[in-house]
Image (spheres, helix red, strand yellow):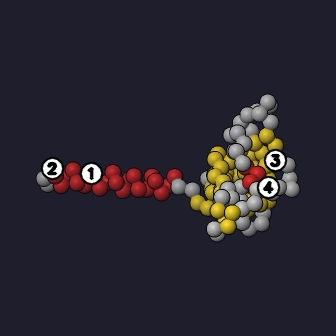
């Protein structure tokens, strides 16, 4: 075999290895029930903040601890523990995406993404609250 062929085979092998590594590290969208069935896996859970229950954030005690309750898109409510500070305009968010895993009956989030209300509502200005 020529050196160029050997080099080509090595490059292809490295590319295949990189693809498999990337596929193993990806998380998937799920509900709290699905995340509870696989507690060792990381999931993205989409839902809405339960505004009827208290969200607890006390930066004097622990600036990197924020707890709240969220209802996923299938209607299941779960306590969420986020080991980061409380995001700005958290209560105004329309939808929340949590990234993390279940630990017992609680979802421990490593990160949070929020969809906040838009300034524009189909061309009509929104009323200030």
Image quadrant assignment for residue 43 = bottom right
Q: Is residue 105 visible?
A: no
Comparing labels 4 and 1, the label whose residue is closer to the camera:
4
**Residue named by callout 3:** 55
Q: Position of residue 41 (x, y in %)?
A: 62, 53
- Which of label 3 and label 4 is nearer to you? 4
Distance between mark 2 and mark 3 Cα atoms: 63 Å
Indicate the secondary structure of the residue bearing disc 1.
helix
- Total marks shown come to 4
Looking at the image, is mark 4 or mark 1 earlier in the sequence?
1
- Residue 59 pos. (x, y %): 77, 33
69 left or right of 26 in image: right
Give the mark nearer the N terminus: 2 vs 3. Answer: 2
Per the image, the residue denoted by label 1 is 10
List the residue tagged with mark 2. 3
Circle 3 SS class: loop
Query: What is the C-alpha distance between the residues marked 4 and 1?
Result: 61 Å
- Residue 123 horizontal side relative to residue 32, left or right: left
Labelled pair 2, 1 in contact (Cβ < 8 Å): no
* CA–CA distance in space, label 2 to label 4: 70 Å
The residue to which callout 4 is attached is 129
Image point 43% across, 56% down: which residue?
20
Alpha carbon distance from label 3 to label 1: 53 Å
Q: Residues within 10 Å of mark 1 (few under 14, many from 20)?
A: few
Q: Secondary structure at mark 2?
A: helix
- Name the foreground residue: 15 vs 3: 15
């Amino acid at each position: 075999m020529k050196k160029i062929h050997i080099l080509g085979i090595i490059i292809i092998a490295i590319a295949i290895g990189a693809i498999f590594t990337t596929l193993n590290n990806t998380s998937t969208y799920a509900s709290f029930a699905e995340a509870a069935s696989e507690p060792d896996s990381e999931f993205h859970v989409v839902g809405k903040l339960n505004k009827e229950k208290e969200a607890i954030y006390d930066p004097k005690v622990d600036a990197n601890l924020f707890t709240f309750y969220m209802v996923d898109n299938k209607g299941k409510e779960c306590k969420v523990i986020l080991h980061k500070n409380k995001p700005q305009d958290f209560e105004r968010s329309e939808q929340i995406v949590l990234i993390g895993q279940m630990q017992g009956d609680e979802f421990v989030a490593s990160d949070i993404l929020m969809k906040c209300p838009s300034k524009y509502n189909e061309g009509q200005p929104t009323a200030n609250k």
